[in-house]
């Protein structure tokens, strides 16, 4: 199995657990407060890699740092717009649509990174995107044009952020890219706490859950960047990483007693088929680099 695929699967597992932790937090904290407090879970991984000099220096290193930092900023901005959607009752009905952001990354990677895919990999990406849709989008009825335009903001921001993560690993190693990517979340967390302070302490359980929320999110991004750094294609890895419900659903069934229907079953089957197709050996794997 290719190293990039192993790291991508680790990202899927981490984000699958992240989704379950988010469910466990429930409504005890607002989404903005959860994001802010989860920063404490990001800190261990950030501190671990922040002191590393990295394998490359000079102009290439600065290009990679700029791309990683930009990816972090764009992800944070996407999160902020996502929280704005959660605050709006009507817009909240289309929030699950934001899960289709890998479509943006796939298109941009093919256009700007000139990534080449085999027919089997293309089929796998289509299956993966179909699975993401089935996992997340229950109904598009009643969505206004304004609502669709608003929900496009996090989709575009997260899609571009994933592309920038890939570009960063063209110039710096995965550890350095992770440190700079996660560094952007610290000031955002501070601002969110200032804007929406806690009325009361979340208690020991709340602190532990928010720590786990940040840690699994950070570890998932670490795995994603390591996958990019090992010659993984953004147009392949990003849709695969979006299949984390394939982990969160079984865990939720075991821990929370949730059930799945025919829609979720179809999504799981599409996801498994998609993973198999995109990981199928390609005759001439090509990953192009781009200068930013």
Image: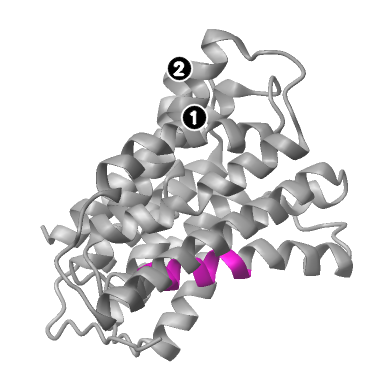
Residue 15 relative to residue 62: left or right:
right
The residue lying at 20 percent from left, 72 percent from top is 231
Q: Main secondary structure of the magenta part?
A: helix
Query: Residue 51, percent across and down?
Result: 25, 49
CA–CA distance in space, label 2 to label 1: 9 Å
Query: Residue 104, percent across and down?
Result: 54, 74
Give the colouring mode of the picture: one colour
Quick check: can you spot residue 125? no
Which quadrant, please, contains the N terminus?
A: bottom left
Secondary element at image label 1: helix
Label number found at residue 243 = none
Secondary element at image label 2: helix
Look at mark 1 in the image and give the residue it sits on: 20
Query: Residue 228, percent across and down?
Result: 27, 66
Residue 111 relative to residue 205: left or right:
left
Label number found at residue 255 = 2
The residue lying at 48 percent from left, 50 percent from top is 267
- Indicate whether 30 appears above or below 192: above
């Amino acid at each position: 199995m290719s190293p990039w695929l192993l790291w991508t699967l680790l990202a899927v597992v981490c984000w699958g657990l992240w989704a379950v932790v988010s469910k466990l937090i429930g409504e005890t904290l607002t989404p903005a407060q959860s994001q802010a407090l989860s920063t404490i879970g990001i800190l261990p991984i950030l501190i671990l890699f922040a002191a590393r000099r990295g394998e490359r220096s000079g102009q290439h290193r600065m290009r990679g740092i700029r791309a990683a930092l930009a990816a972090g900023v764009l992800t944070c901005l996407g999160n902020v717009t996502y929280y704005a959607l959660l605050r709006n009752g009507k817009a909240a009905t289309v929030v699950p649509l934001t899960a289709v952001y890998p479509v943006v990354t796939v298109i941009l990677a093919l256009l700007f990174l000139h990534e080449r895919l085999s027919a089997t990999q293309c089929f796998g990406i289509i299956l993966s995107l179909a699975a993401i849709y089935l996992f997340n989008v229950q109904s598009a009825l009643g969505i206004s044009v304004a609502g669709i335009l608003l929900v496009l903001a996090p989709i575009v921001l997260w899609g571009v952020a994933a592309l920038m993560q890939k570009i960063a690993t063209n110039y710096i190693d995965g550890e350095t890219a992770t440190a700079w990517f996660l560094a952007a979340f610290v000031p955002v967390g501070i601002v969110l706490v200032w804007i929406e302070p806690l009325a009361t302490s979340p208690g020991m359980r709340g602190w532990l859950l928010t720590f786990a929320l940040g840690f699994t999110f950070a570890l998932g991004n670490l795995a994603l960047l390591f996958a990019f750094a090992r010659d993984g294609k953004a147009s392949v890895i990003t849709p695969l990483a979006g299949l984390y419900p394939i982990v969160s659903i079984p865990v939720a069934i075991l821990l929370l007693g949730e059930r799945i229907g025919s829609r979720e079953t179809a999504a799981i089957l599409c996801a498994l088929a998609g993973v198999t197709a995109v990981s199928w050996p390609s005759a001439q794997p090509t990953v192009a680099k781009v200068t930013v």
